[in-house]
Image (cartoon, helix red, strand yellow):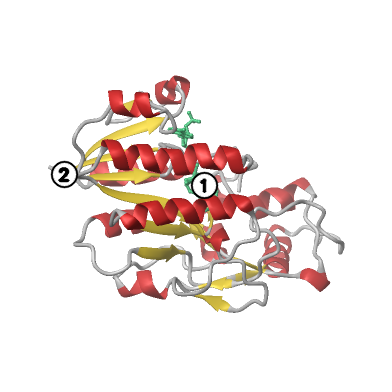
Amino acid sequence: MPRILIAGCGYIGQAAADLFHAAGWAVEGWTRSTESAARLSAKPYPVRGVDVSRRAQVAECAKTFDAVINCASSSGGDAEMYRQVYLDGARNLLEMFPGSKLLFTSSTSVYAQRDGSWVTEESETEPARETSRVLLETEGLVLDRRGIVARLAGIYGPGRSALLNKFLAGTATIDPENDRFVNQVHRDDIAAALFLLLSREAEGTEIYNVVDDQPILQSECYRWLAQRLNRPLPPLGKSKQQRKRGDSNKRVSNAKLRRLGWTPRYPAFADAMEKSILPNLSGLDVKC
Ligand SMILES: NC(=O)c1ccc[n+]([C@@H]2O[C@H](COP(=O)([O-])OP(=O)(O)OC[C@H]3O[C@@H](n4cnc5c(N)ncnc54)[C@H](OP(=O)(O)O)[C@@H]3O)[C@@H](O)[C@H]2O)c1
């Protein structure tokens, strides 16, 4: 039975852990806090509080795993926080699990293109933001050790959709002069991608974009929601909020992952909203 550690058993980590467990893998999950681990005590696999950024804690809990997914999240924060969670975390996991295949969940925020062009894994990555540069540095560490990098688009799924939250909270605006493509991917399609990537023999450069089939203009998302929920369109105006993805405007391609056989269950925003997100409207959080 293959063994896997999910370091960061949060929104994505739990979906991945459940999937690997259902497929017969021996799973162990880690969260930063013991409180989060305790909340997951009913899971059919052990979840422990281990902070990946603390070398001694990781060393204490090191055992043998065939694969390790590093999907701990800084939950925002500044570059220093990113360095601790992503860079130090990856360094500690690589050091303590030298025989395991490490998969790091990075982000499509490493692409800084602003012209709405399509980007692939071969495209330039020159992010303006320090936080995204830390992700790139972490990717470098992982790739040097023949690990896998999954660059996730904006995550959404049951209980989580940044655009829907803004729409419902009345804080959404449509900025016709600064409209941009949003790239998103459903939680369950991410879990399926991580499973696929770790269930096969690795080959070539191991960077994969994990994103649905259809980047969509932000204004179109809001138009679709307004029509579907029978509510007024958000007002026209300039968005004042700082965006995690900076001022980038790009369409991220999933062709490389699709060539491996990954087929998203929710290929487009409307599919995911209709089949998975609107039916689970209660309990939406405000994360993106
Ligand atoms: N959100 C997005 O749209 C987006 C886009 C691209 C990529 N990503 C990446 O996707 C991954 C998964 O994100 P998510 O949304 O599933 O995160 P999440 O729901 O916020 O969960 C994060 C998990 O990581 C744990 N964690 C945080 N710091 C840790 C540490 N130092 N040591 C061990 N565990 C730690 C948390 O434990 P506690 O509950 O105890 O804090 C929690 O279980 C992250 O790598 C994130 O950067 C996210």
Q: Secondary structure at mark 1?
A: loop
In front of the other: 15 or 232:
15
Judge left or right: residue 11 versus residue 192: right
Ligand 1 closer than 8 Å to the CB at disc 1?
A: no
Of helix, strand and loop, which one carries label 2?
A: loop
Residue, disc 2: 2
Asked if the residue under mark 2 is in contact with the one under mark 1, i.e. CB atoms within 8 Å, the reply is no
**Mark 2 neighbour class, 10 Å CA radius: few under 14, some 14 to 19, many 20 or more:** few
> In the rendered structure, which amino acid carries the disc numbered 2?
Pro
**View extreme (left): residue:** 1
Q: Can residue 281 be spotted in the picture?
A: yes
Q: Considering only vertical position in the picture, is 50 above or below 186? A: above
What x and y, as percent, mark residue 270? Answer: 57, 65
Q: Nearer the viewer, residue 86 or 166?
A: 86
Q: Residue at x 68, y 59 (%)?
A: 246
Q: Is residue 69 left or right of residue 179?
A: left
Q: Is residue 282 visible?
A: no
Q: Looking at the picture, how far across and down is residue 85, in whole percent? A: 49, 38
Q: Judge depth for marks 1 and 2 and give the one in front.
A: 2
Q: Decide which of 125, 268 is in the foreground and name it.
A: 125
Residue at image location 72% in from the left, 65% down from the top: 227
Quarter assignment of residue 273: bottom right
The Cα–Cα distance between marks 1 and 2, rounded to whole angstroms, is 29 Å
Mark nearer the N terminus (1 vs 2): 2
Left or right, 129 with respect to 94, comes to right
Provide residue 245's location: percent of width, then percent of height: 64, 58
Q: Residue at x 38, y 52 (%)?
A: 141
Q: Which mark is residue 158?
A: 1
How crowded is the residue under tag 1: few (<14 C-alpha within 10 Å), some, or many (20+)? many
* Placement of 161 over or under 283, stated as above or below: below
